[in-house]
Amino acid sequence: MEGVGAAVAFWTLAGVTLFAAAGIMFSRNLLHAVLLLILTFIGIAGFFVLLSAEFLAMAQVIIYVGAIAVLVLFAVLLTPRAGRDNGESKMLLPAVLLAVCLGAVVLFVITDTSWNTVPSAPAVEHEPKVAASDLGEALLSTWILPFELASVLLTAALVGAILLVRSPEEEAEDMPS
Amino acid sequence: MAPPVLVTDHWYDFRDLGNLSSRLLESLADVLPQGAVYVLAAVIGFVASFVIFVLPSQLFVGVYGERKLIARVQSRYGPNRVGPFGLLQPIADTIKLMQKEALTPKSADRALMYAAPALFVAPCVLLFAVIPFGPNMVFADTSVSLLFYVAISALPVISAFIAGWSHNNKYSVFGSVRMVAMAISYEVPLVLGLLGIVLFTGTLSLQGITIWQKELDIWLVVLQPIALAIFFIGVSAELNRTPTDIAEAESEIVAGYLTEYSGMKWGLFYGMDIGYALAASAFAATVFLGGWTLFGLERWVPPWIIFIGKTHLFYALFIWTRGTLPRLRIDQLMGFAWKFMLPLALVNLVMVATERMFWVEQAADDSVVYVFALVNIVAAGALVYAWSRILGYRPEDYPTKARLVETAGGYVPIESAKGGAQ
Amino acid sequence: MSGIVRSEPFTLNIGPQHPSTHGVFRVKVTVDGEKIVDAEMVMGYLHRAMEKLAEERTYTQNIPFTDRADYLSSMSNNLGYVLAVEKLAGIQVPPRGNAIRVIMAELQRIANHCMAAGTFINDTGAWQTPVMWTFREREKIIDLFEMTSGARLTCNYMRIGGVAFDLPREFEPRARQLLEGLPGFFDEFEGLLVQNEIFLARTRGVGVVPPETAINASLSGPMLRASGVAWDIRKADPYCGYENYDFQIPLGYQGDSFDRFLVRIEEMRQSARIIGQALDGLPGGPHSTQVPLALRPPAGDAYARVEGPKGELGYYIVSDEGPSPYRFHIRAPSFINLSVLKEMVVGGTVADAVVSLGSIDIVIGEVDR
């Protein structure tokens, strides 16, 4: 995407997402951290829209915000009150060192790669978009095996979740007696 | 993209307000600095869709119309004191709410409690950005508008949860947890029902769906009645309207996640309840009822009036069920979503996919869609009845009258005295 | 595996300020997840020392007192009290007085059941629609009360030896008009609800009272009859000439909340039958016997009971030849019926508890006196 609007949107989204990510690290309250995580997800969805992948943006919101964030909220809800502090830890110095090393590696990779850039945006009035139908076709022809494996994994997770929350009476019912 | 419905290019033709706004933006694009026209476009979109359409609909149809309609269902008058026919009642309500003291409990989370109403209002405004009011009157004609609706309608669930949590009140948390569990349960059959629609129309864009219905001269409600039924029930559950409003009424005795809100904060929640219901009605009017088309009438009658009429018609359906039905328990609601609606949605999907495959592969004529409509309507009735009987609905097993005996004499076991009807 | 997740029961207060407890009444439930494991009732928020205060007033002055015990069915309260005093003092009531008493008691039964059925469905969540419909009929009945006795709710109409005033001229046409409309209304109301899937799901199997428990706990009224026990004081121990009228006793099937609802609707129908028969055979003559103003019944005690709309309403009066009773005790049906609340509620959810409580049809004025 090109134009002033896109640039303004990019910088705004970048600022919001980075601020939210920093907030997750530095906030004391675990619930505030989860909410800032949701803001980060929405920011990433905005980036997807900027890259003309609108289907992915909507899928990001539905899956990450609508389902995964809710799951994290429930998990926070079920922890006892004392464990909800996002507080100090003894591993601060090693963690900072590790983060600096990782950041250096990533920066080196970014500056050393030769990106395929063009001097200015190509003059097309209609950029090729990733339409939902293209995604569907790709999932069911080229990438059929990962798709099926993912569905098997989800089914296993579903069965496991149901098994985990059965009460002892229900388990006793199903034991071969 | 849109076929020429309105052969007009005048900016003063109020049948197509898109003309007016595009002329305005074009003329101002030379004057304003580069990029500011985007902001102006957003403002115009907001004013046109939200301020001009949604806000008056919320006040006069949502608050006033709902109270009048429910009152008539209950054989009484509704508000009729404030202004002629009680029409100024919503204004009186708003003024009352604004001047109320907004109490905040001392140990509540202030930041979250203040942020939650704002976070509840924002997705509602966003939803109206993709609803097509007319052939040129849609603010953001993305190619995934349907998915946009589903995605954004997951956001108020989070803000309602935050609202309940921030009160520091265990009953509010209970209400929030119930509401979230119900909302995510009902999203699954909802999306599956909408998938059937997408299979037929081949596009995820709301404007595209409207034009598909216009080109084939058929409304999707007759083509897929099961999808409409699933959508209606699913969206009632998401919006916490009776018969599925456990989250805010009777939930652990007090008002659930709205317990500690008072004044305009509560007013925002209440108003946006109506706002989300209007958004769902607008969405249903677009997808199921044909949107701004009315079999050719949209050439003379402004299409946005047709659209608004259909939205309010669908909203009246919400009001009607609210006044008539009692409320279900939470475990009955969950059972209903997972055991009844989900299999029904899946069977509907299979049926629709078969029909679509037949249509495309046999390269059949477009009028075969009427045959599909007939088949689908019959199948809908049969499927719902058969599935409910399989799940154990046997109305002939329930007594409808008490049994009658003549003399008083102690316990009468059930087999011996058969009185009354059946 | 499920021992990893530990859940703790916590205590919840239903009431005393609550839209569904029918008055100031508190139930402390201990909830484990969504299931109730224990329930404790706390009553007494409306205790007004009625029984003690009655010892200071004469027998006739106590009649308005009884109005306010069960303030929703004042005619039946009055009737029970004056029957007890008449039994104690050996006073005979003329036949016209008896017939008028029967008409008023049955009208009160219909009015009370209208309210009980309406608020019961209110508790299941139907936003006041059934209440508004039943209150339409109740308004017509209360208009009749106002025409006769001067008051809508606390009528103070029965007197020792008969009734206070004779029926006015407009009473009979209005009552007949009401009786014509009632069967249609009952059919419409029943038709809307009895096969409503949501209503059935909320009330069937909720708050079940087996017949042995009902008899052992001395329940009475619609609660007893819904469990299948055919016991109605109008048939078993008739008073005021009830043996001359032709009516039937409705019984339930398994003692759940739905059965209580069915029994109440059917009782309303039978009451309409009785009123029709009473109006047809209304005898002439005086409407009450003359009774001295400061009545001093002989020493002794008497217990009289009526089939009130909520159950067996009994009055136990002990006299010591003074102008006031020595002891005045009300056997309140709501109070006795409430004693099975714990069995009804334990094992269900809080929503079910609210529905069960609504189906017992209590009035806190009677429970606490």
Image (tube, rainbow, N blue to C red):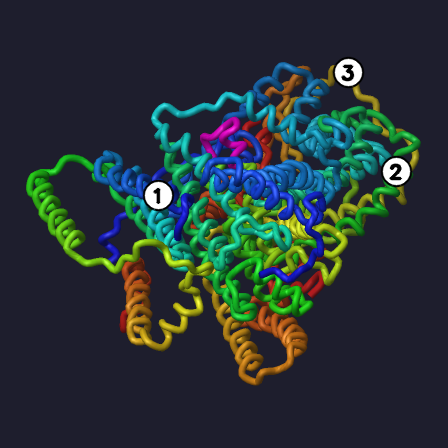
Whether residue B264 appears in magenta in the rendering, the answer is yes
Q: Report x, y in % for residue C135.
A: 72, 39
Which chain hosts label 2? C
- Residue position marked by numbered label 1 in the rendering: A13
The magenta span reads B258-269
Q: Quadrant of the N terminus of chain B?
A: bottom right
Determine which quarter of the picture holds residue C201. Answer: bottom right
Amino acid bearing label 3: Leu
Please, is residue C75 above or below residue C235 in the view? above
Q: Report x, y in % for residue C182.
A: 80, 47
Which residue is at 45% across, 62% downward?
B338
- Residue position marked by numbered label 3 in the rendering: C293
Which chain hosts label 1? A
Q: How far apart are marks 1 and 3 (CA)?
A: 90 Å
Q: Report x, y in % for residue C192.
A: 69, 54
Whether residue B393 appears in magenta in the rendering, the answer is no
Which residue is at 26% across, 44% downward?
A79
Which residue is at 10% across, 39% downward?
A92
Tell me: C193 left or right of B236.
right
